[in-house]
Image (spheres, grey):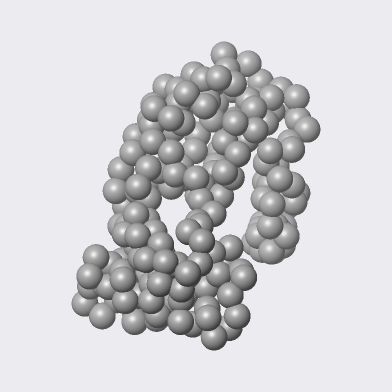
């Protein structure tokens, strides 16, 4: 068994939490394995990998014949209310519209996997709204953790203004009872390597 992530921080945390397991910092798209694994499991990762073709090719190469892929990540229209607010804030500040995530639908992602010899056996797209921790500051904390690529070029003052604009635009759809709810939609897939 081997755990991988492109983030040094995530690998360090995994090694601390599970010292008896093996972990490597590696970009999924550059996996060098050749039919070495019986299974690949991925949770909340693949929406960060915009190059879905290279990711699927690497996963398929690493699986043995008959090997299975089980994954879940952000699917079509994931965080749509948030993205609408992000784009409105970017427009207000004359920033080019940008977000770092890949959110495919079932048909789109099944086609990607099938092009690389992975037969989709099960696919589901479903809503999974989540209450954010932190009360009134929950959305700001979420943006600070997951929205770093969106705000990377902003000065500290511009970042705070951007966050406040996102909150203002998102409030009607994502704010409930003194806290924030993220409009997650998940894509869950089970596939086999043919």
Q: Is residue 177 visible?
A: yes
Task: State the quadrant of the C terminus.
Answer: top right
Q: Within the image, what quadrant is residue 139 found in?
A: bottom left
Closer-to-camera residue (59/24): 59
Above or below — where is 160 with respect to 5? below
| Residue visible at 51% across and 57% down in the picture | 98
The image shows residue 101, relative to residue 136, as above or below, that is above
Q: Residue furthest bottom?
A: 157
Q: Quadrant location of the N terminus?
A: top right
Q: Residue at x 47, y 69 (%)?
A: 94
Q: Position of residue 187 (x, y in %)?
A: 40, 40
The answer to which of 145 and 15 lies nearer the viewer is 145
Q: Measured from the top left, where is residue 64 in percent x and y? A: 66, 20
107 above or below 10? above
Residue 184 shows up from this direction: no
Residue at (45, 26) in percent of width and height = 110
Query: Which residue is outermost to the right?
Result: 32
Residue at image location 73% in from the left, 36% down from the top: 31
In the figure, is residue 124 to the left or right of 46? left
Q: Which quarter of the figure has residue 9?
A: bottom right
Which residue of the protein is positioned furthest toward the top in this rendering?
194
Please state the total of marks drawn on the protein image: 0
14 and 152: which is toward the camera:
152
Residue 189, x across and y down, in percent:
44, 33
Q: What residue occupies the far front of the structure in this picture?
A: 94
């Amino acid at each position: 068994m081997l755990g991988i992530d492109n983030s040094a921080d995530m690998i360090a945390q995994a090694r601390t939490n599970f010292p008896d397991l093996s972990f490597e910092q590696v970009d999924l798209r550059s996996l060098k394995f050749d039919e070495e694994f019986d299974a690949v499991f991925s949770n909340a990762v693949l929406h960060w990998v915009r190059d879905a073709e290279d990711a699927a090719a690497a996963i398929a190469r690493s699986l043995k014949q008959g090997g299975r892929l089980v994954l879940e990540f952000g699917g079509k229209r994931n965080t749509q209310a948030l993205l609408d607010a992000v784009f409105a804030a970017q427009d207000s500040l004359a920033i080019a519209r940008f977000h770092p995530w890949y959110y495919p639908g079932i048909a789109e992602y099944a086609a990607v996997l099938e092009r690389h010899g992975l037969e989709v056996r099960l696919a589901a797209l479903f809503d999974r709204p989540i209450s954010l921790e932190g009360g009134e500051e929950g959305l700001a904390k979420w943006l600070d953790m997951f929205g770093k690529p969106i705000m990377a070029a902003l000065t500290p003052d511009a970042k705070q203004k951007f966050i406040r604009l996102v909150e203002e635009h998102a409030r009607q759809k994502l704010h409930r009872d003194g806290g924030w709810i993220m409009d997650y939609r998940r894509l869950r897939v089970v596939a086999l390597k043919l």
